[in-house]
Image (cartoon, rainbow, N blue to C red):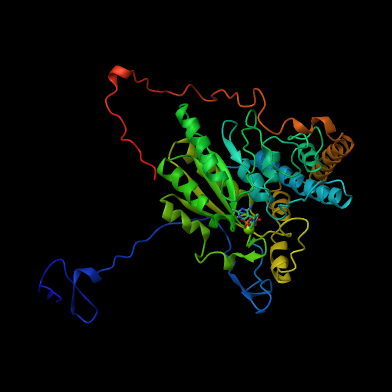
Amino acid sequence: MKKKAKKNSPRNSSNDRGQRLPNSTIVTQRTYTIADYRLEKPSFTLRQVCKDDATCYEIEGDLSASVPPIRESKYLDKKQCLEIYRWMLLNRKMETALENLYKQGKVVGGVYFGLGQEACSCASAYALGPDDWMGPMIRNQGSLLVRGFTARDIMMQYMAKAGSPTKGRDASSHFGDIEKRNVVAPISTLGDLIPVLAGVALGARLQGRDIAVMTYIGDGGQSTGVTYEGLNFAAVQNLGVVLFVENNLWGYSTPADMQFRVKDLAERAIAYGIPGVIVDGTDACQVYDAAHEACERARRGEGPTLIEAKMMRMKGHAIHDAADYVPKPLFEYWRKRDPITRFENYLVKVKKWLTPSENEKLIADVDRELEADRDFAVASPMPEPESAAGGVYCEEGCHEFQPKYGTPKTKVVTAGRLKRVEAAVHLK
Ligand SMILES: Cc1ncc(C[n+]2csc(CCOP(=O)(O)OP(=O)(O)O)c2C)c(N)n1
Ligand SMILES: [Mg+2]
C-alpha cells in the first residue's frame, strides 16, 4: 500500500495544480557547458530516401548561408599564422601530388586524403611543444608535416620505397617516430590510439612530467568501445589527452546522422567529466586556440579535453571511393568553406599580413619544395628483396628506450618490511 504524503513535510513538493507530490517526483534540471567557438552553426540533416539503397541520401536544411569570417585568434601572431598557412598549402599540394602518383601507378596500395581538413590537422599539431606527443590518424598527414616529417617521407612511404619511414614495410601511413618527433604510428583499429596515448601521458607522469598528448578520432570511430575506455581512463587519471573528434560528417558511406543521436559530439565530454569544446574545423584560428588551451591544461596536469572539429570530408573514404552517396549540394556548401581559401583571404585581404605578390611567392616556394621532394621520392630505389625478412619483427635493440623526462620514482619494498599483501586472485 502507498504511504500518504505528510502535509507540510519539507521533503515534499507541490505540482502546478498545487497538489502535494511525494519526494520521488522532484526533478532537478542540471546544466552543462560546452564551449562553442564557431561563428556559424550549420544545421541540416540527411535523410535516407531510397528503401532498397542504403547509400541514397537527400539533404534538408539551409545551404545558402554566407561563409563566416575567420575568428580572430587569442594567441596566434602574424608569423605563426603564416607558418600554419604554409603547412596547410603543403598538406593540400602533397595530397594532390599523391593522387597523381597513384594514377601513374607509382603508389603501392591506396591513398587517404584530408581534403577540407587541413586546418584541423595543421593548426592542431602546431599547438604541440617539442616534448609533447601526437598519434595521428590516416587523414592527418598535415599533422605529420607540422611534426617534422617531410613530404618526401610521406610520398616515399606511399610508394613503399627503401628510404621511407618503414623502409617499404608498409604502404600507407602506419609510421611514427618515438625517438625524435614523439609521434605514435596510426593504429587502423579505430579508437585504439586513445588508450595508447593515455599510456604515453602516464609514462611521462611517472617520469615526473605532465605533457600534452594529442590524438584524433572520426565521427564514426568515436562510437567504438575503446574510445570510451581510453578517454575515461585519461579522465580518471587526469592525463593530458587532447582528443580531436574530427566530425567530417561521414564514416565511410554512413552519414553522421545515422551514427549518433547527440546533437554535438562534444557533448560526450559531459559523460567523461571533462571539458568539451566545439570548433569550426575549417577555421585554423579556432582550431589552434582550442588546441592550445587544451594542451596548456594537459601540461598543468588537469586532464583531458575533447574537441569536436566540425567540417566535411571532401573526398571519398580513400582514393577508390568516388563518394557518389554524398548529395552534391553538401559538397558545394563546404567547398565555399575551403579552409585554405578562407585563411588565404583572411591573411591577404583582412589582416593584410601578405601582399598578393608575397602570397604568390609563398605558393611558388611550396610548389618548388614539393616538386623536389616528389622527384627525389620517385627516383629513389625500392627495398632489396633480400631485406624482406628484416625490419618487421623486433630485432636486437629495437626496444631500448630511455626515459625522456626523468627517472621514474619507484618504491623499493624489502621483504622484511612488506606490510600488506594483495589478496590472491582466482581466475575462473
Ligand atoms: C574498430 C574498427 N572498425 C571498423 C574499421 C573499418 N574502418 C576504417 S575507417 C572507417 C570509417 C571511419 O570513419 P570516421 O571515424 O568518421 O573517420 P573518417 O574516415 O571520416 O576520417 C571504418 C569503418 C576499423 N578500421 N576499425
Ligand atoms: Mg568521419
In this rendering, is residue 338 above or below 146?
Answer: below
User: Image quarter for residue 172?
Assistant: top right
Q: Who is closer to the viewer here, 354 or 283?
A: 283
User: Image quarter for residue 90?
Assistant: top right
In this rendering, is residue 315 above or below 300?
Answer: below
At a point 40% along the width and 44% down the height, the residue shown is 236
Taking the view exactly as shown, the residue that stands out farthest to the front is 428
Q: Is residue 378 left or right of residue 55?
A: right
Q: Who is closer to the viewer here, 123 or 239?
A: 239
For the C terminus, give its image quadrant: top left
Percent x, y for residue 310? 60, 58
Percent x, y for residue 186? 64, 43
User: Image quarter for residue 173?
Assistant: top right
At a point 81% along the width and 33% down the height, the residue shown is 162
Q: Is residue 399 visible?
A: yes
Give the image quadrant in which the ligand numbered 1 is located.
bottom right
In this rendering, is residue 340 above or below 370?
Answer: below
At a point 68% along the width and 48% down the height, the residue shown is 138
Percent x, y for residue 362? 79, 42
Taking the view exactly as shown, the residue that stands out farthest to the bottom is 17
For the N terminus, give its image quadrant: bottom left
Q: Is residue 198 left or right of residue 354?
A: left
Q: Who is closer to the viewer here, 108 or 49?
A: 108
Q: Is residue 61 visible?
A: no
Q: Who is closer to the viewer here, 175 or 277?
A: 175
- How many labels, in total? 0
